[in-house]
Amino acid sequence: MKIIEKKCPNCGANLDFKVGEHDIVCKSCRRKYAVEYGDIDFDQLSKKAQDALGAADISLRPVRRMIIAIVIIFFAIVAIGTTISVINIANSRKNFDERVEESQREYERNSQEMMEKSQREYERRVQEMNESVK
């Protein structure tokens, strides 16, 4: 399907070409031109081509929206997961600190009990020795 018509700059004849072609040869003067699609005048597209482009654009809109939604959901999940991980790490650190403090208190209690027990044992032995000497 021919969809573009332009005039030959050399002889003024019509230059007909299809989208996708890279070169045009004028049928009248045999001059060769490179196609630059940035210069295409879309007002010259046939009605069929315009309808096809419109249908393609319409059919891609839901896909674009779905892709955007998936990307947003992905980043939301990553953000929520990161937040939960940070909270878990903070709670683990808090629990660890509490266990360390409890261990220190228990160590101090045990040390104090052992010192008191040793002191009582020492005093008992001293008393026994004193009694044996008398």
Image (tube, rainbow, N blue to C red):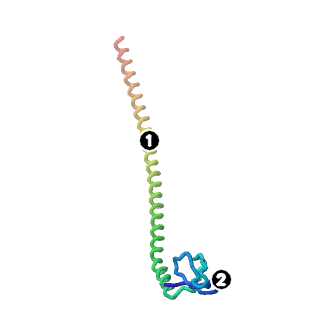
76 relative to 104, above or below: below
Q: Residue furthest right?
A: 10
Vertical order, 44 against 109 (above or below): below
Q: Quadrant of residue 110?
A: top left
Task: Please name the residue shown 44% across and 63% down the image.
Answer: 77
Q: Residue at x 51, y 76 (%)?
A: 20
Task: Look at label 2 and name its amino acid.
Answer: Asn
Q: Position of residue 25 (x, y in %)?
A: 57, 80
Circle number at residue 10: 2
Name the mark nearer the viewer: 1 or 2: 2
In percent of width and height, residue 19 lies at: 52, 79
Give the quadrant of residue 12: bottom right
Work out whether mark 1 precedes mark 2 in sequence or the reverse, and give the earlier one.
2
| Residue drawn at x 41%, y 28% as measured from the top left | 115
Find residue 119 and name its label: none
Asked if residue 129 lies left or right of residue 86, the reply is: left
As drawn, the label of residue 100 is 1
Kind of element beneath mark 1: helix
Residue 89, how many percent across, how many down? 45, 51
Residue closest to the eye, 100 or 34: 34
Task: Count neighbours of disc 2 (C-alpha within 10 A) and say few if under 14, some if 14 to 19, many if 20 or more.
Answer: few
Residue 102 or 20: which is nearer the viewer?
20
Depicted 77 relative to depicted 131: above or below: below
Residue sitting nearer the eye, 74 or 52: 52
| Disc 1 crowd, CA 10 A, few/some/many (<14, 14-19, 20+) | few
Q: Which one is nearer the viewer's eye here, 17 or 132?
A: 17
Q: Residue furthest front?
A: 29
- The number of numbered badges drawn on the structure is 2
Real-space Cα separation, disc 1 to disc 2, in angstroms: 91 Å
